[in-house]
Amino acid sequence: MDLNYTAEEMAFREEVRAFLKAKLPPEIAAKVASATQLSKADYDLWHLALAEQGYLSGPWPKKFGGQEWSAVQKHIFEEECALAHAPRIVPFGVAMLAPVLQAFGSKEQQDYYLPRILSGEDWWCQGYSEPGAGSDLASLKTRAVREGDHYIVNGQKTWTTLGQYANKIFCLVRTGTEGKPQEGISFLLIDMETPGIEVRPIILIDGEHEVNEVWFTDVKVPVENLVGKENEGWTYAKYLLTHERTGIAGVGGTNAGLQALKRLAHSEMQHGRPLIEDPLFAARLARFEIELMAMATFNLRTVAGADAGKAPGAESSMLKIKGSIMRQQINDLARRAVGPWAMPFVSEQMEGNLYHPGPDYSAKASNVYLNNRKISIYGGSNEVQRGIITKAILGL
Amino acid sequence: MDFNHTEERRMLADSLRRSLERGADWAALAELGVLGALFTEDEGGFGGQGFDIAVIFEELGRAGSDAPVLEAGLAGGLIADAGRADLVERIIGGDLKVALAHAEPGMRYDLGPVSASVHDGHLSGRKSFATNAEGADLLVVSAVAQGKTALFLVDPKAQGVTLHTTPALMGGTISEITFDRAPAEPLGDAGTLEARVAAATLAVCADALGAMETAKAMTLDYLRTRKQFGVPIGKFQALQHRMADVAIEIEMARSALINLAGHLSAPAPTRDRHVSAAKNLIGRVARLVAEEAIQMHGGIAMTEEYALSDVARRLVAVDHRFGDEDWHLARFMKLSA
């Protein structure tokens, strides 16, 4: 047992810190810290800064221009980014599609798409979920029918995060109806400019526009946009889901949330004293911090295991459940902490250019709390994750 | 013992429910007697007891109503306490909408100290979290005059009154109000504020119970109809048991509300012990019901378009009105020691 990072890992942490200090624009960090929605330009600017430093492709294999970061390095990078309030890396291109293309794509697809992901030329979004296919993703119905050199795609995708900014979408589509539902699914790359695609905003419970519906009506997709083999898309999708699992606990973000909450609780007053001195609130905070310390180590055990060649299996389901609950708890504590300031409810989608009348730290407390109810639902709901643990770890 | 509401209260609740389903407006609520039921006979109404408030607000919460009924009872009650029968009559008739502006930015959930002040008949200061003050005809405002906190009537349209209004988490509106030498008519002392806030807290608890019942009904309906993996998701035991727990907690909330309604007229320490017990418990259950209803629905409940989002926000807001779980827990600890 050795609970310390190696000298190389600590040096890497310093390097990341120095980069963030030099390159992260304070106005963007301020937006992230206050949970203000980022514009496409904000994302693009940060994406490019990371690409120039080589961080964007840090986890990629060297032969695709990456640095083959270890899971520990990736963890350190994510932790530092969260603490500095850097925007999250929009994962759909760089962290989700790219590994699939690297593993299953044709040489032409790799040569064409991978550089465009790094340059920011392509903004990818994900076309998986459908209104009738949520937790039961394999029941998806969007059809792709081969006609000569094209597939003709009809159907509807939903929960398409930041689809309003995307020019490309990777989709799971049904190309076969034989056998098990998982067997007739293919992985298709689609240009969002193609006629017949319509993106409709979904306003969420926090009043913000983050996700979309994407409708396909007789959309012509060239057959060379098929990734791998027809009807084997489910294998690629599963690969994608297991690939990005070490960061799933979101420890960095939760830790940043705890630090922010402590600062807030020094400013917010209760009975004329800082809230942090209120014994009931302080107890809530302490219990949370105790759990977070344990979860951080739980997370690192999995991260270190991944570097030792142990594929994170059902542990990632455990981390997803615990991580999402703790993320939601810190948002819940922040909402409690701002007290009555949680009641004025303002979102950027509302007309009239309304501003929140309370202190800056209180403006988005309710919105963030409400928005993050999603994280125990998406990416395989916590109920689905518990099912995986029951079977894979407990053998029940 | 009898845990049934009286015939009159049941009839009022039933007709209120039907009217709200038909989209009853303010005049219709007044016509129905909803506003009169907030006041005692002595005050010119025909109710005013804990259980009158309980049945009315349970229906308003169930329907998700934004009508400023709580404000009519709270600000109107303070007006009644000052003996202004002329104004109470207009409130009960639906001709006068009133709202209370009492809280201030640093008070959090405490009822004082107030720093707004009145000099020579003019009120200055900043008030926070005034619900449904936008659209009110008359504000009841607390302020310090001659060293004591007293209540004043202020016309929200008068010079020197500025409202900054946003939507409120629970529905309706919430305003920050600045008063800059606004003309203020003395109403009376603030001696009954705590009792009126206790009644308003009961109203929030009852409203929460109604909203919980709606969340429960919507979730049950969804569990029965939404299919994944080839079956209605309500067939999964994991969800069945969670729904059973939600149903148990809602009965706990209903019981805590009954405890409070039965003790609203008790002496202050007993009353407030029940206020804090109910508000603490109902604050917890409201959040549980909101979170569980969202989780059991899945993604659809995250959308603004789906009706549960309003219900969930209303339930989450419960813990931010008239004291949160911890505020009431601390007070309960003091009153029970």
Image (tube, coloured by chain):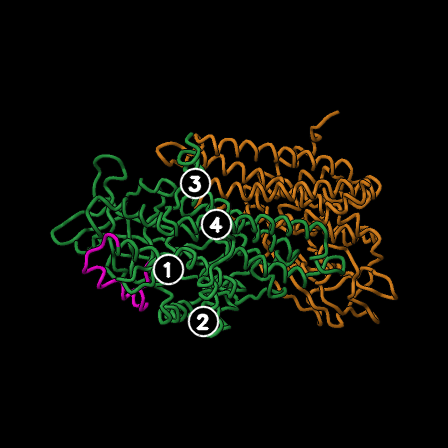
- Pointer 4: what residue? A299
- Pointer 1: what residue? A69
- Badge 3 element: helix
Q: Disc 4 sits on a residue from what chain? A: A
Task: Using the rendered image of the protein, determine whether residue A247 is visible from the camera's viewpoint.
Answer: yes
Three-letter residue code for mark 3: Gln
Label 3 crowd bin: few (<14), some (14–19), many (20+), radius 10 Å = many
Give the CA distance from mark 1 to mark 4. 17 Å
Q: Is residue A104 magenta?
A: yes
Indicate whether A346 appears above or below A319. below
Q: Disc 1 sits on a residue from what chain? A: A
Which chain is represented by orange in the image? Answer: B
Q: Disc 2 sits on a residue from what chain? A: A
Query: Between residues A282 and A40, which one lies in front from this camera angle?
Result: A282
The residue sitting at the bottom extreme is A22
Residue B160 at x, y = what percent? Answer: 71, 72
The residue sitting at the front extreme is A1
Label 2 crowd bin: few (<14), some (14–19), many (20+), radius 10 Å = some
- Badge 1 element: loop
Residue B313 at x, y = what percent? Answer: 56, 49
Give the CA distance from mark 1 to mark 3. 27 Å
Which badge, 1 or 2, comes first in the chain's sequence?
2
- Pointer 2: what residue? A19
Indicate whether B148 appears above or below B39. below
Three-letter residue code for mark 2: Phe
Mark number, residue A385: 3
Which chain is represented by green in the image? Answer: A
Which badge, 3 or 2, comes first in the chain's sequence?
2
Q: Quadrant of residue A90?
A: bottom left
Same chain, labels 4 and 2: yes
Identity of the residue drawn at 45% across and 61% down: A9
Identity of the residue drawn at 47% across and 46% down: A319
